[in-house]
Image (spheres, grey):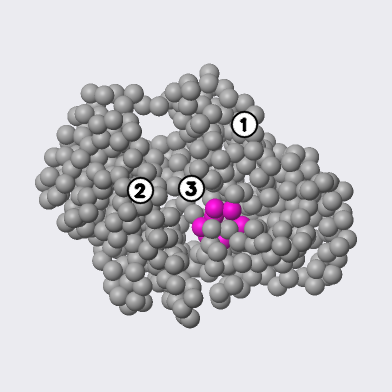
Amino acid sequence: MSGLVMPEPKADLIARRTEIIAALRTIVPGEGVIDSETEMRPFESDGVTAYRQLPLAVVLPSTTEQVSKVLAYCNANGLPVVPRGAGTSLSGGALPLADGILLGMGKFNRILDIDFANRAVVAQPGVTNLGITTAVAHEGFYYAPDPSSQIACTIGGNVGENSGGVHCLKYGLTTNNVLGVEMVLITGEIVRIGGKHLDSGGLDLLGMVVGSEGLLGVVTEVTVRILKKPETARAVLVGFPSSEAAGACVAAIIAAGIIPGGMEMMDRMMIHAAEAFVNVGYPLDVEALLIVELDGPEAEVNHLIERVAEIAGGLGCLTLRASTSEEERVAFWAGRKAAFPAVGRISPDYLCMDGTIPRKALPQVLTRMEEMSEKYGLKCGNVFHAGDGNLHPLICYDANQPGELEKAEAFGADILLLCVEVGGVLTGEHGVGVEKRDLMPSMFDETDLAHQQRLKCVFDPDALLNPGKVFPVLHRCAELGRMHVSAGKLPFPDIPRF
């Protein structure tokens, strides 16, 4: 597994493998437990295939009660658990452990309730992102967050990673569209947070669970809000002679008070790869392409397209083409959403990175990334959510060439460190997982990380849920719980303690 260091497997758990598997089979009978090496192979990695590890066993529960009993058993026996959705994670968040079970939630694939009156859908975590939109489309509704992998990624995985997509600029990420969850704690206790109402009183526990990467519990049910499809939606392709000009256009559009339904940017390499893959009519004589979607009442959309055209023209755009039908709008987006698989045709392997920067830093970051590409001798294509500064550089390499994977990882780390340097963050929607774990100290100091781990300790005191992810060094909760007492006095004695 490249140079990745994971927690040392516990020999006593591996020695008890036969006993553990037998116990799990009493909880999840039939084909619910997979233990042969061949059958476990599909679960050895997620979307980051550079990291691979067979689990102790794979468990595929089909009811919340089974999840509860499995977690209670693991808690009683000190057995690590790695929750897994569809395995599309691009941060290694579902990488198994040799001494732990992988808990696959694929059988939780039903929509339980569609409530148009309250504009909410209750779904099991194994329902795909696109599956929710498909289920409500006949009434003119849709689910706003739409990651590029929406045809495959599941709503449970979206909750774990706080996924976004092309519409997140205007309509928010997963955290802005989830109303409630049912979650099983490591003790087996089943809890409900939120519901069909917009906001819950008290602490924002729901906001804490979304994006927690399987560290706090296993989600078994998700309530999401659905939106009415806008009256009109049109996409505009705008080509520029440079990425810097395209970046300036992004900033100018937002500064003008226009909030597009989506605003994506692709560089020359990605434009050509996507066009060759889907043939949607992207201009091939430009260095950068913006896809700007405007939605709302028809008159407003037409007016905003004119405004965008004026702004783009003033910044030297070379081409501008607005969709004239729904089919054409969908085709414009098809190229963008096919960008990642399209790169598979021009490079044997690639790393898809994920970092977020302030919009104003876009020209600077793109220039620095070009310099890094020359330094490492590796091509890098850029496609990203331009409106909110969420970058997705794709670093091309050949894993069969000795040292290229290591160079690609070092290149990716430099990009993420650059994001932090210019005032951004390590991730926008892919999560930390193992990919960015060891870079966390570049963004958080020891005190910050310790406070984050204390929160995990409340839910998972023995660190059994997805250990080895997110935190570069996972302290035992007993260590984090120690409090320094000087001269018989607690620090800050005026603060209430519970």
Tag 2, which secondary structure?
helix
Residue designated by label 2: 278
Magenta segment, principal secondary structure? loop
What distance separates the C-alpha of mark 3 from that of mark 1? 19 Å
Amino acid at pointer 3: Ser
What distance separates the C-alpha of mark 2 from that of mark 3? 16 Å
Residue 361 visible at all: no
- Can you say whether 339 is above or below 440 in the image? above
User: 313 left or right of 378?
Assistant: left
Labels 1 and 2: the sequence-earlier one: 1
Q: Marks 3 and 1: CB-CB under 8 Å?
A: no
For marks 1 and 2, give the one nearer the viewer: 2
Q: Marks 1 and 2: CB-CB under 8 Å?
A: no
Q: Is residue 166 magenta?
A: no
- Can you say whether 388 is above or below 142 in the image? below
Residue designated by label 1: 111
Task: Magenta stretch: give its range.
Answer: 87-94
What distance separates the C-alpha of mark 1 from that of mark 2? 32 Å
| Residue at x 18% of width, y 52% of height | 240
Q: Pinpoint residue 244: horizontal percent, then vertical percent.
A: 21, 58
